[in-house]
Amino acid sequence: MALLVMKFGGTSVATLDRIRRAAKRVGREVANGHEVIVIVSAMAGVTNELVGHVQETSPLFDAREYDAVVSSGENVTAGLMALTLQEMGIPARSWQGWQVPLQTTAAHAAARIERIPTDNLGAKFAEGMKVAVVAGFQGVSPEGRITTLGRGGSDTTAVAFAAAFGAERCDIYTDVDGIYTTDPRITRKARRLDRIAFEEMLELASLGAKVLQTRSVELAMRYGVRLRVLSSFEEGGDEAGTLVCREEDIVESNVVSGVAYSRDEAKMTLMSVADRPGIAASVFGPLAEAGVNVDMIVQNISEEGRTDITFSCPTDQVMRAERALNEAREHEAISFHDLVVDTEVCKVSVVGIGMRSHAGVASRMFRALSDEGINIKVITTSEIKVSVLVDRKYLELAVQALHNAFGLDRAPDAAQG
Ligand code: ASP
Ligand code: MG
């Protein structure tokens, strides 16, 4: 019998009425002959409230107790969902993480899943249970303490169950109806994608992060779990939503699949650094130790033994980066003339697996930006992505221009350039 994993996010279980609507969808899959593992989030807003209670009680909280508190929202929805299904005459029961047991590392509040034994749930399915409702986001550490997987972790729970049980598909029900070519708030021309490759989804995390926890996409890619993102508010047919899948399962695609952006970036340039072996290590070592997430890096040709090094990082890490670099200079670990900081930039990227086989993506991108009079400050590329730093005031314009330039408002076959 085919097994499906269906995950319902906080807005999809926000009220008893919505839980009933979600349960009806589960009921339809059971009627179609499926066994179902349902993963639930806490009711919308509940986790935030619990986090607030913890912080108010104990600002420097013990992470083990934080997990004990914040994991509880999911317990409520798991029980309510099981009750709702039972009321519909469907054999269902709830499972908390430790009952499965979903085994994780001991990294509280950011635990990683280590193993999901299938025997406990499997035995109940064999006895006739049709639906196992599992509390998302939570697990149990080797010490037997309750852990959580980080905010948005129920997505990862869902994918991990789909992998462990070899599910036919993992459906993620949320409040948006899929993954878009770009942020629909920036351009109304943004279009829902029918399919997107795992790798593209990871690169588009800045768009999709709120839809899918990045870790869940990594897991799905590693285990080849077919992930579908769809809205629980629409009565769509089976084709609705976006399928996140292997590249080979995508027949038609644009060279570029989406335009992503990150608004709060800073550009830092170390002017006139002594150019000798080991210099990059002595610059980026202290930054790494200070916990600065360096993204783009550019080193220029050196003249007379000195060079400029430019890098980008999130704006809220600029002070930390400055401190680390100035300290390294004081200790004579590095020498530079000046540190120039520009906190008014943003990053805009075009992403697509089609780039591997198509030349000219970068030049088309640069042309589109220059036609709008947008100056490019830093460029980086990877196999399936080209990113630029531009002034933040051009963010919307840049995204719109690139969305047009790559024909993303049109369906794939029509738009091939
Ligand atoms: N309830 C948790 C959160 O809000 C986990 C989740 O919903 O995925 O982060
Ligand atoms: Mg979520």
Image (cartoon, grey):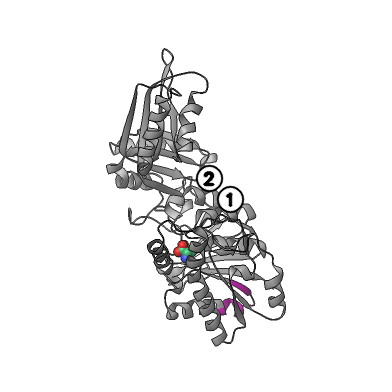
**29 magenta-colored:** yes
Secondary-structure class at tag 1: helix
Whether 104 is drawn above or below 45: the answer is above
Amino acid identity at mark 1: Glu
Residue drawn at (57%, 85%), measured in percent from left and top?
86
Amino acid identity at mark 2: Ile
Residue drawn at (67%, 65%), measured in percent from left and top?
165
Residue 166 in the image: x percent, y percent?
67, 63
Label 2, residues with CA under 10 Å away: few <14, some 14-19, many ≥20: many
Q: Which mark is residue 187?
A: none
Residue 15 in the image: x percent, y percent?
42, 77
**Residue 157 figure quarter:** bottom right
Whether 239 is drawn above or below 196: the answer is below
Residue drawn at (49%, 36%), measured in percent from left and top?
359
Residue 103 in the image: x percent, y percent?
63, 61
**Residue 30 figure quarter:** bottom right
Nearest to the observer: residue 149 or residue 170: 149
Secondary-structure class at tag 2: helix
Q: In which quadrant will I find the N terminus?
A: bottom right
- Could you give the CA–CA distance between mark 2 and mark 1, rounded to whole angstroms? 8 Å
Give the left or right position of residue 322, taking residue 160 as reference: left
Q: Which residue is mark 1?
A: 247
Nearest to the observer: residue 214 or residue 202: 214
Nearest to the observer: residue 172 or residue 142: 142
Q: In which quadrant will I find the C terminus?
A: top left
Residue lying at the far top in this picture: please name it. 304
Residue drawn at (30%, 45%), measured in percent from left and top?
397
Residue 103 can be seen in this image:
yes
Residues tagged 2 and 1 counted as in contact (Cβ below 8 A)? yes
Q: Which residue is mark 2?
A: 353
Q: Which residues are magenta?
A: 27-37
